Image (tube, coloured by chain):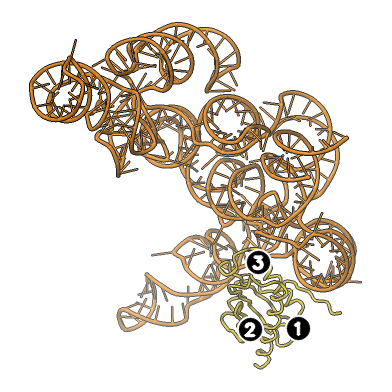
Amino acid sequence: MKVFKFGKELRLLTAEDYQDVFGQVDAKVQHRNLLLLARCNHRKTHRLGLIVAKKHVRRAVHRNRIKRIAREMIRSRPTSQPCLDVIVLARPGLDRMDNRRLSAILRQQWQALTNKSCAL
RNA sequence: GGAGUCGGCCAGACGGUCGCUCGCGGUUUGCCCGCGAGAGGAAAGUCCGGGCUCCGCAGGGCAGGGUGCCAGGUAACACCUGGGGGGCGCGAGCCUACGGAAAGUGCAGCAGAAAGGAAACCGCCCGCAUCUCUCUUGUAGAGGGCGGGUAAGGGUGAAAAGGUGCGGUAAGAGCGCACCGCGCGGCUGGUAACAGGCGUGGCGAUGGUAAACCCCACCCGGAGCAAGACCAAAUAGAAAUCCGGUGCUGUGGCCCACAGUGGAUUCGGGUAGGUCGCUAGAGGCAAGUGGUGACACUUGCCGCAGAUGAAUGAUCGUCCAAGACAGAACCCGGCUUAUCGGCCGACUCCCUUU
C-alpha cells in the first residue's frame, strides 16, 4: 500500500503562484459545474489551488466540503508526469452534489487534464 | 391515557485504514517518529452592548442618534430577574414602545345632519296662526306651515363629550340621588411603579393620534484585528560620513575656476514577504454561603481549536429510532433567525380506572 501525503508542497501558497498559472495556461478542462486550469511546474509533485467563490457556493459548509474533496482527490492520485500546478474553480450548482458524485466528477476531469497535458 | 404550558439537555454510535493543523517529547535534523488535543447551539444574521487597539479630547452648550412603568443584576446593554398596570386564555401561562395630548404645530378617507370650544336629519314636546281631511261633530283625531325646547330613541361611524338605574319633566337633560368611571386634595400600605380607602367637584372638562413633528428625563467621541506593533528583499531620498591626489560632460582659445555626473558605509523609508497581536478568558466544573430571583462571594479542581489559499477530513465495516440546520477567523455578554429527531424535570385542563 502506497502512502499518500498532503503537505504544503502540494499546494499553491501565494498570490504569485496563482498568477503564474493564470498567466500561462497549458491545459484546460471544462465541466458544467467546475473548471480546471493547469500549467507544467517542473517539480516532483503536483500542486493544487482552489477557488470556491462565495458567489457560486453560498454556504461555508459546502465550500469547505468541496475543497476537502478536491484535496483528497489530489492526495490519492499517483504523481504522473508531467507535474502540474492546477487551479480548480467552482461554478454554480457544485454545492448541490453529494460527496460520491463530486469526487467521481473530479477524478474524471483530472484524468482528462492529465491526458491533455501528456499530449503536449 | 389524551391535549397543552414552561424550563433544561443531546445533536448518530463503535471499530479498522489513509490524511490535515497545533502542542509536547524523541531525534539518525528527514518537515522523520511517538503521544495528546482539534467547530456550534446556533460557530450564522451583524441587530445591540462591552473588552482590546489606534486616532481625537480643558470645560460647557448646540446638532445628531438611542432608551422610555418601577426596583434590582451586570463590564455594559435595546439583555436578564423580580414587581406593578393593561390585554388574552377554563387553567398552567402568554403578550405588552407601558413617560407627556390642561407648551405649541399638524393629521383623520368613507359614511353621517353634525368630527372638536360641534351639531337638530328623522323623532319627541310646547306655543302661534288657522288650511285640508276623517266622523264617534268635540275643549276630538290625523296631516301640512311658522317659532321654540330637547341629545332620551332611530340612523352613520373606529369614535357622537361620562355609564346603569330610580326620581324628575311639557318632552328631556348630572337637573337631583345611588353605584361605577373621571378630575382634585389628604390619609394608609409599599424603596418605588402602584394599590386601597376617605373627602370633594356634578363632570360643556382634559376626545384620538407622540413606531407625526415635538416636550421631558437619562445615555452616547471616531474607526476597527485588513485595529495595531515589529522585522524587512525591492524602490523613491538635494539625509550624513568617508574614498579617487581627480575619470567623464558642459561653459571657455587654454590653464585655473565653476556646474553636473560616481563608489562604499550608515541613516531614513516602508512595498512583496514574514513575526507578533492569537487565545488563560467578565473561563469552565463542583461544593458551600447570601438572595424570592437574575446574580454575587468563598474554597477546591480542570487546562478546553487557533488555521492564514486558510486544519478538524476521506474511505470501509457493524448497529439503530437512519442522523436536521449548519463550519471558528481578535475575544466575550445578549437578541434574532434556521433546525431531523429524541430525552429529562415541573405544572395545567379533560377523560378513565382501582
Q: Colour of chain B?
A: orange
**Residue behind mark 2:** A39
Residue A75: image location, x then y, percent: 75, 76
Mark carried by residue A54: none
In this rendering, the answer to whether B73 lies above or below B178 is below
Question: How would you rate the neighbour count of disc 1 (Cα within 10 Å): few for under 14, some for 14-19, many for 20 or more?
Answer: few
Relative to B93, B147 lies left or right:
left
The quadrant of the rendering that contains the C terminus of chain A is: bottom right
| The image quarter in which residue A70 lies | bottom right
| Both marks 1 and 3 on one chain | yes
Indicate which disc, 2 or 3, sits on the residue closer to the N terminus: 2
- Residue B309 in the image: above or below residue A117: above
Q: What whole-number distance in Å separates the C-alpha atoms at marks 2 and 1?
A: 15 Å
- Tag in front: 2 or 3: 3
User: Which residue is labeled 1 in the image?
Assistant: A79
Subunit of mark 1?
A: A
Q: For mark 3, does the 10 Å Cα neighbourhood hold few (<14), some (14 to 19), or many (20 or more) residues?
A: some
Q: Which residue is mark 3?
A: A62
